Amino acid sequence: MKKIILIFMLLIGVVSAKAREPYGDYICRYIVEDGRYHVINNPIKITHYGIQVKNTNAGTKTWQANYQGPIRLTNRGGSERFHNFYLTNQHVEFSISDRPCANYNGKDYYLINFDGQWQLAEARY
């Protein structure tokens, strides 16, 4: 019985180690509307306390956000793991893919869904 518990705990550790933390800095490169890609280049910072977006037109916006955990979104027969946030004051959802899963012009990007609008972002290190 002890061996089964030990193996189970080891398996949980391996599975959780493969999950990526969504917190960090990104640059949103494109907004996708009606199949067209529009360049935006807005820095996004995701922290434990909220989401901060630096927009060249409107300055810096910071939204309080609650992390709701991972979800799976399905598109064209496949599914992808996303991290889901709820922006408490705006009453909208913000989700970011666990890994770069969208390819545009030969480059891989993270997918962001902000209140139904799709965006492509890259991690900033």
Image (cartoon, helix red, strand yellow):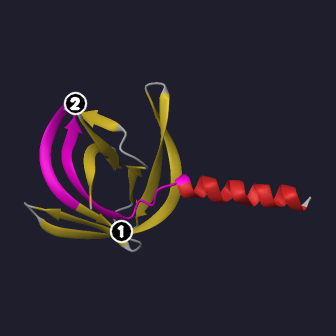
In which quadrant is the C terminus drawn? bottom left
Kind of residue indicated by mark 2: Asp
- What element does badge 1 sit on? loop
Q: Is residue 117 visible?
A: no
Pinpoint residue 79: horizontal percent, then vertical percent: 49, 35
Left or right: residue 94 compared with residue 7: left
Screen quadrant of the N terminus: bottom right
Q: Which residues are magenta?
A: 18-43
Query: In the image shown, does 125 or 28 lie closer to the viewer?
Result: 125
**Splitting the image into 4 quarters, where does residue 111 fall?**
top left
* Label 2 vs 1, first from the N-terminus: 2
Q: Give the farthest residue toward the left.
A: 57
Instruction: Residue 44 in the image: state x and y as whole percent.
Output: 25, 61
Q: Residue placed at 17% from the left, 57% from the top?
A: 42
Secondary structure of the residue carrying numbered label 2:
loop
Is 23 situated above or below 41? below
What residue sits 61% from the left and 52% below the top? 15
Give left or right: position of 88 versus 78: left
Q: Residues within 10 Å of mark 2 (few under 14, many from 20)?
A: few
Q: Characterize the local packing of mark 1: few (<14), some (14-19) or many (20 or more) Cα atoms within 10 angstroms.
A: few
Residue 45's spot in the image, x, y percent? 28, 65
Q: Residue at x 13, y 49 (%)?
A: 40
Q: Which residue is at 22% across, 52% downward?
A: 28
Residue bearing mark 1: 89
Q: CA distance from mark 2 to mark 1?
A: 28 Å
**Which label is found at residue 34?**
2
Nearer mark to the viewer, of 2 and 1: 2
**Residue 3 drawn at (x, y percent):** 86, 58
- Which amino acid, mark 1? Asn
Q: Is residue 4 located in the magenta-colored stretch of the structure? A: no
Mostly what secondary structure, the magenta segment? strand
